[in-house]
Image (cartoon, grey):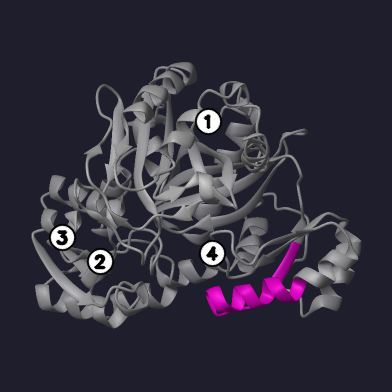
Amino acid sequence: MRRLLVANRGEIAVRIIRAARDLGISTVAVASKADADALHTRLADTSVEIGPSPASKSYLVADALLAAAKETGADAIHPGYGFLSERAAFADAVAGAGLTFVGPAGSVIERMGDKVAAREVARAAGVPTVPGTPGGVSGVDAAVEAARETGYPVMLKAAAGGGGRGIRVVHDEDGLRSAFGQASTEAQKAFGDGTMYLERFVERARHVEVQVLGDGTDAVHLFERECSLQRRRQKVVEEAVSPGISQQVRDAMTTAAVQLCREVGYTSAGTVEFLVDDDSGAFFFIEMNTRIQVEHPTTELVTGIDLVAEQLRIAAGSRLRFTQEQIERRGHAIEYRVCAEDPARDFLPQPGPVGRVTLPSGPWVRCDTWLEPDGTVPPYYDSLMAKVVVWGADREEALARSRRALDEFSVSGIATTAGLLRELTDEPWVASADFHTSTLEQWLTSRKETS
């Protein structure tokens, strides 16, 4: 691998370019018109403008990305997360052009990207799955019949879904009949596939994911991350490792994740996601993300392993460089997603120019961002501005460092979620890790009602 094209933007493009430079790999940035002078374009060795500002006319145009790779002599493409990162057709097109795709094969992306098919793979690997339909349901009547067998409440989910779209929780037959068409239509618009499946809704559940690396022959895990603090099914705060599971559950879950990777011959970094019943401790496979995750820095801080660099090494043909026994964890890490949104106005996006920018730093604080003073938050993309990531010898120290780091974060000109995240760190239920996937939404509701 000599020259890498980074088919993404923002903080993840910056992150990938830096990892490649550490390995002596030349980098190519791509940019829409809105990102023509963005940080990632100036950090890379070469930059190519690939289209107008909307992602649908630039970052989501596979032909434009492949043309940029050909023009610059790139021999590999890293998709980052989002955009085309989990499109099997894009991975196949990259390989078809004689280039290296930094990620699993298109066939694996397709197999694991379809949540129904992924559940079947999990069952074949002996990994527990949430009770529900074995495949997609043909219509609302079939869904009603399946719900009678599974028992309410149930969750309707898009087979090709992700990012919380195409999902509805229903508590009775009337609710299911009302929600089915809406969810299917939403899934069709978002993913081009309106197929729905159904699974039992675990009411007090933790969302815990296991970080994995595979080289196609073997696989290892790098422990787990707690991702239960969510708003509208979007992660807000993540931790490595989970403070809410026992060592027995941790061992069983990480073993299951590795079994799943071996079942499909997984290559590259990936994440196996589980729901954990907060009452019983039982865990269930829900999906696999066949890419690097937004929250990967927490794992890097507790293991000392650069996940993006390992992706690049594996894509270039290297075998895994360590055994499971050689991977150790130390301390605790927490990541806060700071977004250009106004919490006081129902998280209204805040595109526009910014002025002064103060980013947190100091011992054991990492801030992954594309943000610069006197820059502009474009209106075309995700509102994520920065990821503030802290490490501590234990969770208590990590929370204390979180408060200091979030106090330091400052951006003039627009509203951000930094203040809300800082407020969150003082909540007793956060300190005690007494939460599940609905807790943050409930706290936000009560906070709004009392303000």
For the residue pair 258 and 334, the one nearer the viewer reads as 334
Which disc is residue 412 wearing?
none
Which comes sooner in the sequence, label 4 or label 2?
2
For the residues carrying marks 3 and 1, which lies nearer the camera in this image? 1
Please say whether residue 195 is one of the residues in the magenta stretch: yes
For the residues carrying marks 1 and 2, which lies nearer the camera in this image? 1
Quarter of the rendering containing residue 61: bottom left
Which disc is residue 112 wearing?
4
Q: Residue furthest front?
A: 451
Marks 1 and 2 close (CB-CB < 8 Å): no
For the residues carrying marks 3 and 2, which lies nearer the camera in this image? 3
Quarter of the rendering containing residue 116: bottom right
The reply to whether residue 98 is in sight is no
Mark 4, other Cα within 10 Å: few <14 / some 14–19 / many ≥20 = many
For the residue pair 72 and 210, the one nearer the viewer reads as 72
Local SS, label 2 = strand
Q: Amino acid at mark 4?
A: Met
The reply to whether residue 293 is in sight is yes
Mark 1, other Cα within 10 Å: few <14 / some 14–19 / many ≥20 = some
Residue 280 screen position, x and y as percent: 77, 34
- 93 relative to 118, above or below: below
Which comes sooner in the sequence, label 1 or label 2?
2
For the residue pair 300 and 336, the one nearer the viewer reads as 336
Q: Amino acid at mark 1?
A: Leu
Local SS, label 3 = helix
Local SS, label 1 = helix
Which disc is residue 77 wearing?
2
The magenta region covers 180-198
**Quadrant that contains the N terminus:** bottom left
| Residue marked by disc 1 | 424
| Residue marked by disc 3 | 41
Q: Amino acid at mark 3?
A: Thr
